Image (spheres, helix red, strand yellow):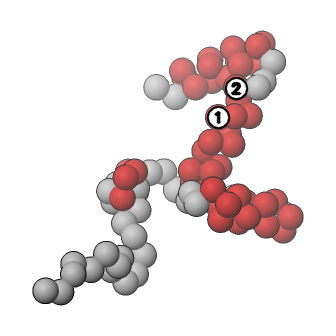
Amino acid sequence: MPRASTRRPPGRPPAGKNGQAVTASYVQTTLRLDPETKDLLDALTRLLGKPQRQVTGEALVFYAERLASSDRELLRGLLSRKK
């Protein structure tokens, strides 16, 4: 009796959270990075096994959480204006 294949199908896996293709709802942006920063981003995505959008998103949250309390308060105010 043949075994069920455990190999992934060819091609790129579905994008989005938990492999669900929800990326159409994501906002698209373009960044210009110096080569060293791009190399760092590429290395982090390979090391962590996460997409660039997730690595950059987590880095922004990490950065924002470490701002001075007065800057965090200003940031909250700026974010609340967008809603």
Between 11 and 74, the residue placed more toward the observer is 11
Residue occupying the point 37% across, 66% down: 14
Residue 24 appears in the picture as rendered: no
CA neighbours of label 1 inside 10 A, class few (<14), some (14 to 19), many (20+): few
Between 46 and 81, the residue placed more toward the observer is 46
In the rendered structure, the answer to whether residue 44 lies left or right of residue 53 reads right
Residue occupying the point 46% across, 26% down: 83
x and y percentages locating residue 6 in the rendered image:
31, 75
Residue holding disc 1: 61
Residue 61 appears in the picture as rendered: yes
Dot 1: element: helix
CA neighbours of label 2 inside 10 A, class few (<14), some (14 to 19), many (20+): few
- Looking at the rendered structure, the kind of residue marked 1 is Val
x and y percentages locating residue 61 in the rendered image:
64, 34
Residue occupying the point 84% across, 68% down: 35
Furthest-left residue in this view:
1
Residue occupying the point 58% across, 60% down: 49
Furthest-front residue in this view:
1
Determine which of the numbered discs, if any, sits on residue 10 in the image. Answer: none
| Rendered view: 79 above or below 34 | above
Figure quadrant of the N terminus = bottom left
Tell me, yes or no, whether the two marked residues, 2 and 1, touch with CB atoms within 8 Å. yes
In the rendered structure, the answer to whether residue 55 lies left or right of residue 19 reads right
Determine which of the numbered discs, if any, sits on residue 65 in the image. Answer: 2
x and y percentages locating residue 45 in the rendered image:
64, 61
Residue 57, picture quadrant: top right
Distance of label 2 from label 1 (alpha carbons): 6 Å
- Looking at the rendered structure, the kind of residue marked 2 is Glu
